[in-house]
Amino acid sequence: MEYIDYYKVLGISQDADTEAVKKAYRKMARKYHPDVNPGNKEAEKKFKQANEAYQVLSDPEKRKKYDKYGKDWEHAEAFEQARQQQGQRSGGSGRAYTYTEGFENAGEFSDFFRSMFGDEAGFGGFSRGRRRTMAFRGEDYKAELRLNLRDVYQEQKQVLTVNGKKIRLTIPAGVEDGQTIRIKGQGGPGRNGGEKGDLYLTFRIADDPDFQRIGSDLYTTVEMGLYTAILGGKLEVPTLDGKASITVPPESENGKKIRLKGKGMPVYKKKGQYGGLYITLQVQLPKNLSEKERELFLQLAELRAKKQH
């Protein structure tokens, strides 16, 4: 099995905190994302390694095991349990019980376990006495689901095919780009009666042409006419659930921001809670003025000049 140094993959030190892990992962994900490097197999490999490293190092329990056992961290607990149980069985009885079944593919693991446990864990010769089966948990699967921003405005149902298996799931409203959820029992089958693995599903939310998302808030820019900016009035603006009307105050400057409460994205797993919609008003100057309009603007300019004096 090839050893992958997760710290080296993310370019961080072993004492890096959780925030540093997250920051390094985001940097790697942006650099090697398949959308940025279409058809680049090397970039795809680095992207997958970064995801794998983040899944382990961002989880305190997994990271603790990884720091202790390296690439074999997922199997370390089972081997330790086998050794402890065997020691208890053989103590004082004169008989040794070898756990052979469930370790028949021990060649998959590194020499690290051989040096720790030797043949007593079932790697080598057989001791006298009965053999006992050790159950192994199934492999965890990882998958990505690509959606549009508008897809996650409401809860929806999807059917995914992972490793040839169709999985029906409900996607909660408000999931974010890069967010990973665990779907229990939808991974690989267990061995020797062990429980199934889990499915870790990562969402990739495409950018929207009209709205920028930051957390549960949405941001958009809306044009308004010069006369509306000066005199004020009603203005129709887009939202993810249709049109809304806002009141523009008189003498509104270009770039003025207006917040619509509850018109942003739904807050993940908090039913009925929504972020805000922040609207930046952009003044649209009139073009192709008629002679009469030019005269009126000249009069306004003269009035303004007199007022300033």
Image: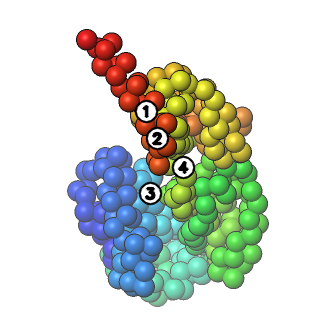
Query: What amino acid is at disc 1?
Result: Glu
Query: Answer yes or no: do the residues labelled 2 and 4 have beta carbons within 8 Å?
Result: no
CA distance for labels 1 and 2: 6 Å
Q: Position of residue 77 (x, y in %)?
A: 48, 63
Q: Earlier in the sequence, mark 2 or mark 4?
A: 4
Residue 158 position (above or below residue 190) = above
Q: Is residue 67 left or right of residue 291?
A: left
Q: Residue at x 25, y 63 (%)?
A: 11
Up the image or down, 189 lies above or below 199; here it is below
Residue 176 vs residue 60: left or right? right
Numbered tag placed on residue 211 in the rendering: 4
Which residue is identified by label 2?
A: 291
Secondary structure under tag 2 reads helix
Work out how far the residue at label 3 is from the one at label 4, CA to CA, in angstroms: 37 Å
Q: Residue at x 60, y 26 (%)?
A: 233
**For residue 62, which numbered disc appears in the image?**
3
